[in-house]
Image (spheres, coloured by chain):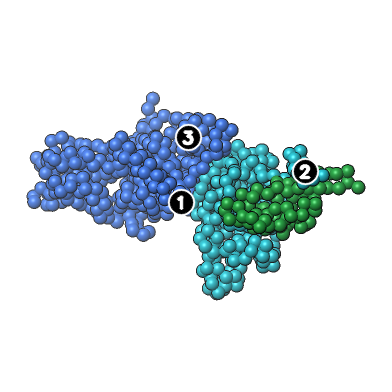
Chain colours: A cyan, B blue, C green
Amino acid sequence: MTTKEIINPANLVYDKTSILTDNVMHYCPGCSHGVVHKLIAEVIEEMGIQNKTVGVAPVGCAVFAYNYLNIDWQEAAHGRAPALATAINRLLPENVVFTYQGDGDLAAIGTAETIHACNRGENIAIFFINNAIYGMTGGQMAPTTLVGMKTATCPTGREPHLNGYPIRISNLLAELDGTCYVTRQSVHKLAAVRKAKRAIQKAFENVIAKKGTSVVEIVSTCNSGWKMTPHQSNLWMEENMFPLYPLGDLKDR
Amino acid sequence: MEEVKLMKGNEAIAHAAIRYGCDGYFGYPITPQSEVMETLMDEAPWNTTGMVVLQAESEVAAINMVYGGAGCGKRVMTSSSSPGMSLKQEGISYLAGAELPCLLVNVMRGGPGLGTIQPSQADYFQSVKGGGHGDYKLITLAPSSVQEMADFVGKAFELAFKYRNPALILSDGIIGQMMEKVILPPFQPRRTNEEVRKECPWGTMGKTDDRTYNVITSLALEADVMEATNRRLQAKYRQIEENETLFEAINCDDADYVYVAFGSSARLCGDAMEMARRNGVKVGVLRPITLWPFPTKEIERLAKRVKGFMVVELSAGQMVEDVRLAVNGCVPVEFHGRTGGSVPSSEEIWDVTQQKLIKK
Amino acid sequence: MAKIKGAVVIDSERCKGCELCVEACPSDVLGMSPKVNTKGYHYSEMVNDDACIGCAACGYVCPDACVTVYKVRID
């Protein structure tokens, strides 16, 4: 059978979900954001919740997330997505509300909103992209930047006595009584992508079951910010990010 | 039958919010407005009307909760006092930029900084000149009685939704804390989700099959798109100025001198006006009810025939600048202000009026 | 014995040439085209058609949702 013959709708096994719009994403080539957007879109389609899902976009690289998923969206001020999501969830308790935030948004400027939304156990899902750098503004130090890692604002490498330590915010959030599910995933390999998708689905299921706040951290790459190829970034992430941010569930109740 | 009650201005705000079908209140305690949330928590409207009341972790979170709720088309509000309002300014700019209707309440206290918990009117500039970043305007209502605290909740929601713009009740510690009789509005049911969808088809209540998805945002990176947004906003603001300016003119028709004052200051000027009239001087009071839009045209009109204006504020002089712009040098505009929670007596106001304006 | 055979279609206009699909493919099916799309990116394409098993690893890791995968079972 020739390739041409195989390419037939009857044989389709993998395709772009219709929840993703046709807009080409503005992300750099190889950026993890695209994979996570795609997974969220796939889960929304598979769960049939397009008409009740409301997304809250952050400030950061994902500021234009609302251009890519065919659902209602609100664009929050930097760090405030969990506050918006809190109100949307309280006022529309039957809807499915999620925030999509980067490390600066969630773990620096929005730390208070994140912690308190989780502590109140808001029925929302928080998708947290941790790539240890500020991508949108051009590669500055993030709260999650590794010790020794070079960025535009720690050009000789992060030094704890100057810049403090990388924050493992998901561990902190797992300590709060309001969170029901806190997990750390990645999307750099087939198996990892599958696991991350299951985690995203579980987070949405928890929202529907009103179990509390679910946090899915995705340890991600920023090859432009890290100044590596996408593939090199994956290897670097495995070697350097995973020891500090080990993958797996931190909490599941 | 009308229910006449005796209560604080802050309490009246809370009761009125429930009765005007408010969907959600998000706040953070700060003196002298804490009774707003305390009253709501006492009334527990989530058991009756279904209204959500939430104590946020900060004023910043509270205003962003308002953004989230307003973005769904819901009738939501927050209240605070001056330092807390400073914290909310970022969120207010975003609300204005995303054209979200909501009610904000500022029960002003003295500043700058942590200042004092005593009453003040020194947030006039913050309220009507921007406060946050960018070219935007807040519909600003200034109540001068507990009755107006209640009434303006309804008025502010009406204007906010009519124009898709945040509306502010700019009160102060005097009006917030003092007790007066008030007739509360009749209970108005909260809108159903279907009614909200109909009134606010732009809201993010979940996409329906008959429309493309909605986005609430204030972001427009391209210069031409951002400028088009600003032009649209400015056109809306001109329309509000044209249609919604409110003021109260007391004895202005035959007046030689006119007090211009808002909120609690206007009450003091009313007493000073009585004193002046007893002394044979024809004095009137012009009380702007909307601080933005400002009653510029009415002041312009009066400036053509009166001998002078006296502006009285609980600040070092803020609204006086708008009065001077309106008067445009036609007649003298004098100012008397007290700060830090000190409140002038009506005798003091009348004395200063004679010294500065009349005996000149 | 049954044989699984796959095929991959890349939306060459959406593709940004990140090469993650090339790395993810367990059968070395994909390579980069010498041609570029209208944005100037070299896009990925099938260079070893016969080796494709339709596992969709390329699709899963693609950040830009440009991959469509087909699979047949040949008895």
Real-space Cα distance between discs 1 and 2? 44 Å
Residue linked to disc 2: A6
Residue linked to disc 3: B200
Q: Do marks 1 and 3 share a subunit?
A: yes
Identify the mark nearer the N-term, 1 or 3: 3
Q: Nearer the viewer, residue C24 or B255?
A: C24
Query: What's the residue at 85%, 44% (across, down)?
Result: C74
User: Can you tell which mark lies on residue A191?
Assistant: none
Bin the neighbour count of mark 1 within 10 Å (Cα to Cα): few under 14, some 14-19, many 20 and up: few
Q: Do marks 2 and 3 share a subunit?
A: no
Disc 2 marks a residue whose amino acid type is Ile
Query: What's the residue at 10%, 48% (across, down)?
Result: B358
Query: What's the residue at 68%, 49% (across, down)?
Result: C10
Query: What x and y, as percent, mark residue A35?
Result: 65, 52
Q: Nearer the viewer, residue A105 or A177?
A: A105
- Tell me the subunit letter for badge 2: A
Disc 3 marks a residue whose amino acid type is Cys
Query: What x and y, as percent, mark residue B196?
Result: 50, 33
| CB-based contact (under 8 Å), mark 2 and mark 3 | no
Secondary structure at badge 1 equals loop
